[in-house]
Image (cartoon, coloured by chain):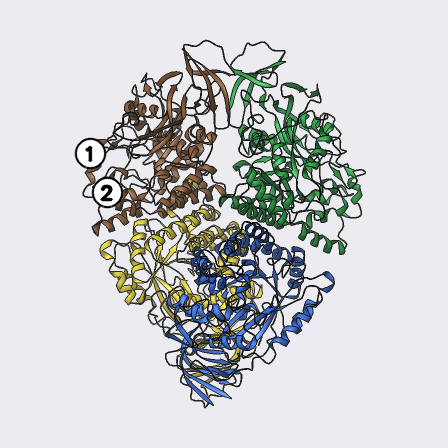
Chain colours: A blue, B green, C brown, D yellow
Amino acid sequence: MSVLIKNGRLVTAVDDYYADVFVQGEKIALIGADLTVEADTVIDAAGKLVIPGGIDPHTHLDMPFGGSFTADDFQSGTKAAAFGGTTTIIDFAIQTQGRSTLEGLDAWHSRAAGKATIDYGFHMIVTDMPVERLGEIDKLVEEGVTSYKMFMAYPGVLYADDATHYRTYRKAGEVGARISLHAENGIVIDEIIRREVARGHVTPTWHGKTRPCRLAAEAVFRAAAMAEVAEVPLYIVHLDCNDALVEVKRARERGVDILCETCPQYLFLDDSFYDRPNFEGAKWVMSPPLRHRSNNEPLWAGLTKGDISLVATDHAPFNFEGQKEMGRELFTKIPNGAPGIENRMSLIYHGGVVQGRFGLNRFVEVTSTAAAKIFGMFPKKGTIAIGSDADIVIFDPDVQRTISASDPATHHMRVDYSAYEGLEVQGWTETVLSRGRVIVQDGQMVQDGGGKYIKRARCGELLR
Amino acid sequence: MSVLIKNGRLVTAVDDYYADVFVQGEKIALIGADLTVEADTVIDAAGKLVIPGGIDPHTHLDMPFGGSFTADDFQSGTKAAAFGGTTTIIDFAIQTQGRSTLEGLDAWHSRAAGKATIDYGFHMIVTDMPVERLGEIDKLVEEGVTSYKMFMAYPGVLYADDATHYRTYRKAGEVGARISLHAENGIVIDEIIRREVARGHVTPTWHGKTRPCRLAAEAVFRAAAMAEVAEVPLYIVHLDCNDALVEVKRARERGVDILCETCPQYLFLDDSFYDRPNFEGAKWVMSPPLRHRSNNEPLWAGLTKGDISLVATDHAPFNFEGQKEMGRELFTKIPNGAPGIENRMSLIYHGGVVQGRFGLNRFVEVTSTAAAKIFGMFPKKGTIAIGSDADIVIFDPDVQRTISASDPATHHMRVDYSAYEGLEVQGWTETVLSRGRVIVQDGQMVQDGGGKYIKRARCGELLR
Amino acid sequence: MSVLIKNGRLVTAVDDYYADVFVQGEKIALIGADLTVEADTVIDAAGKLVIPGGIDPHTHLDMPFGGSFTADDFQSGTKAAAFGGTTTIIDFAIQTQGRSTLEGLDAWHSRAAGKATIDYGFHMIVTDMPVERLGEIDKLVEEGVTSYKMFMAYPGVLYADDATHYRTYRKAGEVGARISLHAENGIVIDEIIRREVARGHVTPTWHGKTRPCRLAAEAVFRAAAMAEVAEVPLYIVHLDCNDALVEVKRARERGVDILCETCPQYLFLDDSFYDRPNFEGAKWVMSPPLRHRSNNEPLWAGLTKGDISLVATDHAPFNFEGQKEMGRELFTKIPNGAPGIENRMSLIYHGGVVQGRFGLNRFVEVTSTAAAKIFGMFPKKGTIAIGSDADIVIFDPDVQRTISASDPATHHMRVDYSAYEGLEVQGWTETVLSRGRVIVQDGQMVQDGGGKYIKRARCGELLR
Amino acid sequence: MSVLIKNGRLVTAVDDYYADVFVQGEKIALIGADLTVEADTVIDAAGKLVIPGGIDPHTHLDMPFGGSFTADDFQSGTKAAAFGGTTTIIDFAIQTQGRSTLEGLDAWHSRAAGKATIDYGFHMIVTDMPVERLGEIDKLVEEGVTSYKMFMAYPGVLYADDATHYRTYRKAGEVGARISLHAENGIVIDEIIRREVARGHVTPTWHGKTRPCRLAAEAVFRAAAMAEVAEVPLYIVHLDCNDALVEVKRARERGVDILCETCPQYLFLDDSFYDRPNFEGAKWVMSPPLRHRSNNEPLWAGLTKGDISLVATDHAPFNFEGQKEMGRELFTKIPNGAPGIENRMSLIYHGGVVQGRFGLNRFVEVTSTAAAKIFGMFPKKGTIAIGSDADIVIFDPDVQRTISASDPATHHMRVDYSAYEGLEVQGWTETVLSRGRVIVQDGQMVQDGGGKYIKRARCGELLR
């Protein structure tokens, strides 16, 4: 199997040039001017960008939630991702409290096996970690799971106390892994919620009001302090507000190895969505919540300057009907999460490049390269270079589309609404290669399945 | 009863002038040049400073600890305080977990009643605070207990979780009270200790090494965040290191009502004391611990600039023999605390005024006035003005002494060592009036007993 | 001559108590409860505040400007000051470039002699300072002129280059004097003005637009850097915007001895005044200009927290008719300055105490005590204490007035408009003593003249 | 002409992979695994890094100085650069005050023409810029000179006042050019020098002592303020100390487009060198001076984190004998500058990669790619990509050498000393291609001459 992509403008996180790319089997084999080599498939990319396939390091497919599951499984979710130009995801395996993390990993392998169209890795969500079980972490590393997510939010569910955090951080640092953090002080938030609910504040609006930004900043500061003492690299997921960003920057400034991602929802949307009538605000009930719109530009600026490393989606879709509706009487019962796995690349191209906040190289970096480097997949993933996996997106920089759940061309996620309904964007994924296979061509899926698990390397190690 | 103090140099937190002071009964009645009024007692203060009696808002007298008690009770402790020029203390009543705070207050009233030579108030240490018991706080305010101390350290003992903190903060804010905080993340510290002890690190040196400054800064940040959301004034006790001070300043800068005290031990001593041979380091085992000496000057600077409001002692004396020795095999068993109630005024005069860091007005402010204002006792206490309690110290600015547990003239505390053994200071308390009674004259106690409980006003309210 | 003030609430920068004050001759002689001493004059201050007379350390009386003079001379200006509760001013003597500063001092002594109703000191404006003339500064100190103002603005007029600044700073530091700074980069501002005028931008609005805040911050940073190297205390006059305040705070944080004042116009007014029709904006043409209203609250906060030491007026009145009008065709010809000497105390009481930004003690500190301490006049001025000059204001905290140039009761300045026209304030000066003389009583001037020159002490020295 | 580089490890600012590179004429034509294409020259790069040729954007070749010239001209200097792995320089053309900048450009074209072995561009040093001459800047842009360097140091020589700065900044911003700044307040420095020389302080040690870091920080702040108002991108050359770096970061944080370079001397050396006996300190007399060694690590950290964009040399060699010696009696007469054009790549590889401060990608970025992007030469220069100039260095990451002026293999600069004498480094340039020509092979020059002038694009524009 071979593919020749002709006449494209190749853009990586640093380069920008015109050349042809020849893919042999799963790998990129040759890059040159006017290649004349023969290929099974020839794609003309004139006028298009040829970029590394997107990497979304934060998705929740087929995730159990209160007797139900997120609306996309590994089949529907990875297909939607592919349509959006994403060729790799890292999903979250969850440890059941009191049980082995390895058991959790097995469970998630079962969920994904044979279903994914694009490649995937796993983070491990650690919910407890007594001393006697620390040895599991060595095994997780062997299994290619080199990042562990921990929560300061969701007491009684995913929350882990500071002792568990510290123990896990210390061990992760020793084995060369990275800690991911959901940064909200859930203990205090639950107190605030209790008080407000007692006052009859039960609508989606109160989801936002009961989770102040300051408690996100607090969690960042606390985790950074623990990570500094424990000597482990830290990564803040779904950074949502400027207060939290300020603490990321300060910790980094004093030498802490701390990085962060944000998500499109925190860049494009704001907490005014919660006030929509007819319970519609529930569509955006997620944690951390949408913030006041004064946070949007500081997050964009953080992305431009490098204070924020990349954009992930936190894709956690729940249908409005049947799922979100469970919280009609009380906002705390609304499943937390929103869809987005399909929209990321176009949103960031539009908001970043079209609107002039940053250039093409940075677009590629924040949507692909940075995630590959941070999470031990580079240069196998995240670039267009000889020997890398041929995960390539041919992206039309000029086409304009309106995102809508009612337009099958813009919405392949298995959920009954779009978080970005009605938003017009410029820039669209046209054709997608995953390890040399053309899976989407001119906006149509031409091949599905075939996604493989990626054993990720340790922090700072190359994966060839 | 009346006293006339002649020829002194009167110094308050703002003024500095020569005048005579006439005390009638318990109050200051008249201030003027060359007063000719008759008095029962006439004191010549020529060449001396006439200053408001010192206020030490952080003492632990007769405090139970693991079957034993701090070595000074309200009798011996307040006498030692008086010798050192302190005429008011605020001690800490402790709530037994699961029991009423009012019960704790009663217990402490019993400990103090009839024993104190100087006036005293109580903070309340809150160890739990379920919703149904929040009403107690209204009663505490009525009883003149308008500040509540909470711990992030000492899990299993005085530690309260973030939910308890937040609930108490919120209520305290509503009633106009202030929260005091012991700022160390004890949960993480216990993890660190567990790990180090397992490696055989059991000497006093490891007391310091297992409590990193960063975890003090973390606690300050967290408490400031909770206080900001809960809208309550916050006060950090025994601020010990620059990392923590930085967070106090940042919180204040963004508008949080946050103040802090430091203690002489964090200004004059450092963690090299822990390395002293023959287990002597145990004398300085306290929490937070002595820090690296690079913290001394930033704390002094904070005191000079007003970033730190005042100097308290955290007087918590344990005898080396019989008490400190309990931890010979394991540093965690050493009772935490050190003596200092007697030394504060001379130490701060010496380090502040004599060594040129600040002037006389600031000396008075940090040793007396600020505590009175912050803790609802001004202008009854903390100044020399008409109508104020005649708590007056006649201070010799020139005399030099060497502090030593073996010199009865410099050590009246009932504990078998001095934390400042061998330190030479300039500036010494000569004569002390407490509510008009001369209790110390020329370095001799001439009257003891007679101290009364002070019902303190709310934050920002005057107490006349 | 003696005066007894009965039943008042005495407030100083730290104290707050009820007492009677007895003034003998020029000095405060006795303070006590229910004084029965006989006096030539007895004033009942029941329900009133008895506070130290205000000190305005920034006025320009009888100042020559382009062939004309500021509208108030030392006679009219000091009377207006007295009506407003100010009993001391520090005016600015100006060195003629190329001539001796001592000559400038003589000239200003001539302007003031025999005219002032309240006491006055002089700062010296230094416009050049060649090496051979540095010796003058020793003489200035002997003459009680211990602060030197220098300009980075007004090239060709009062501007001094960085070499002159540095030389003067260094010498001032050596003799224990303080440098005052007008902080705007006038060189760059003139470039901006040249460009805008060339584009036809000639109205008062462009006075504000051509002097960006960033260039005030720049001047603060530069002066602080020079002062740090030269080891001299620095004082920023008329601090006008948050950008500049940030630099003051940063310099102080790193140890620079830097203080600042602001003025009521920067607290209450904003640059929207420049857009008033009929050239009315010219009334507020001053340098630095009024700023965007987003600067008002940060300046108030700076005053509350102590980042800004005090409030002066920069009183530099020019009549709208005949003076301001000179710039009808071109804003650069409008005389720079506005009146305010009379309004300061009521404005700051209203904005500070009545509006809840700070308490009575801070009100006294920022209107009187701080200026006395910073500029070498304490405790002679700036407090109510035995031995201090009896400069006392009896202030009615409850009365409400509307400031207006058309109301003779609220406007005694010799200028045809008020910068605060129509502003309602609560709190008004009722009776004023200057060195024991009652000069204003119940809002009427009862005695004028009699003001004396004050030889000020060096930085940090007391003046008894 | 064609060259095939086989078996190398290709490293760019983002990529890191094994491949062969085929160069056709001046350009990179093909990159692939195991290329079998025929070539005139085949180089085996097994075990070596294949990286973009270095770019040094700060050199002073053949620069007139007080009747003399820097010791390297474009011939010797570019050869030394090539030996060190640098294939592009940007030198500084100087405007004679009062004359046209274009005249200055012509003069420098004459100096360089036909002499250079590697490609070169020019910055223009602007010493004055009256309004009527601003039009020259449009012509400079046409000539490919899109960056203008200005001095706040060297009064009477290269210094330009703030008005000239501002005018030039504003115009540069309008045409899409960038301002480079020598950031030291030379006016104040000259005052300090005058004072110290008068005290007999004339040795090289005083070169450092008379140029405090604070005055570098001041200049950065001032220029950033002017650039912010003038809306022009700013670039600080030879950033030398942490105080200055802090201001770069703060300006960037508030949105100013400000970048900076540092030089190896500020990373590796410190001001203790000035104290060397026998006037040897003169070798390191340069401006800004070497700083206290506490600045080294913060600058390295800035380079690691991206706060500093790149490393240039400020190569300005003067022989110790005959040139440096002119200042034996007075340090101000020592020609300012030191050699380094040859040492940069090995020094930064050693200090950055070998010593573990950053990785290979960042090494390439700071030595090549960043300069190309910032100064309008990318992707023609600064990367290894199809269509780019074949400026390629084959770098041996393992070989260790000791830099010494007495070792002809490590010192090809035409100057009688090395600033890094005796320093051992790991990592050495083996073979160098300049636009496809092999100029250095295995450490021997095999072809010289052939360097061309580069017309640079505007800020942010690509140069293909």
Residue D151 placement (x, y as % from top left): 36, 53
Q: Which mark is residue C332?
A: 2
Q: Is residue D27 above or below residue B40?
A: below
- The residue that disc 1 covers is C321
User: Around disc 2, counting alpha carbons within 10 Å, would you say few (fewer than 14), some (14 to 19), or many (20 or more)?
Assistant: some
Q: In this image, C272 relative to A223: left or right?
A: left
Does the CB distance between marks 1 and 2 fall below 8 Å?
A: no
Question: Can you give x and y, in whole percent of width and height, for residue D374 in the image?
Answer: 40, 64
Q: Quadrant of the N terminus of chain B?
A: top right
Q: Is residue A328 above or below residue C43?
A: below
Please, which chain is the residue tagged with disc 1 on?
A: C
The image quarter containing residue D194 is: top left
In the foreground, A22 or B94: B94
Q: Quadrant of residue C122?
A: top left
> Which is nearer the eye, C313 or A212?
A212
Q: In the image, what residue type sits under mark 2? A: Thr
Q: Is residue D312 visible?
A: no
Measuring from the top left, give residue D308's x and y in whole percent: 47, 59
**Residue positioned 26% across, 63% down in the render:** D138
Viewer-closest of D453 and C217? C217
Tell me the quadrant of the picture where the C terminus of chain B can be found.
top right
Circle 1 sits in a helix, a strand or a loop, which is it? loop
Instruction: Pick whichever of labels 1 and 2 is earlier in the sequence.
Output: 1
Residue A417 place in picture, x, y as percent: 47, 69
Secondary element type, mark 2: helix
Query: Numbered disc 2: what chain?
Result: C
Can residue C64 be seen here? The reply is yes
Please, is residue B436 above or below residue A100 in the view?
Answer: above
